[in-house]
Amino acid sequence: MRLVADVPHERYKIQIFNYNAKYIVKIELAQFEQIFKISEMDVNGLEDVKKMITDQILKNSLDRFITMRTDWSEAYKNINV
């Protein structure tokens, strides 16, 4: 897997990789991460992939990160029972 871009952002660590004829967009926040895979055939290169990283997708990612944190907190309680 080859790193092809770091996308600057004040809240998230966003990286784009290229692997196996796919672009892989990784969005990280604290100990959680989300990954989106896009076929190279569905876009016209790296710039198209960057254009897909919109405010709306990042807002939706934040909502998922909050859900992930809640799920993890609930699962963590199982070891303290």
Image: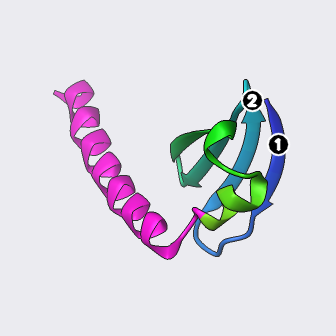
Q: Residues within 10 Å of mark 2 (few under 14, many from 20)?
A: some
- The residue positioned 29% from the left and 35% from the top of the image is 76
Do the residues bearing badges 1 and 2 touch, measured as CB atoms within 8 Å? no
Provide the residue designation for mark 2.
Answer: 19
Q: Quadrant of residue 80?
A: top left
Provide the residue designation for mark 1.
Answer: 3
For residue 56: magenta?
yes
61 up-or-down from 21: above or below: below
Question: Which tag is nearer the camera, tag 1 or tag 2?
Answer: 2
Location of the C terminus (image quadrant): top left
**Region of the chain picked out in magenta, as a range:** 52-81
Q: Nearer the viewer, residue 18 or 44?
A: 44
Circle 2: residue type = Tyr
- The residue positioned 53% from the left and 70% from the top of the image is 54
- The residue positioned 66% from the left and 49% from the top of the image is 43
- The residue positioned 84% from the left and 47% from the top of the image is 4
Location of the N terminus (image quadrant): top right
For residue 64: magenta?
yes
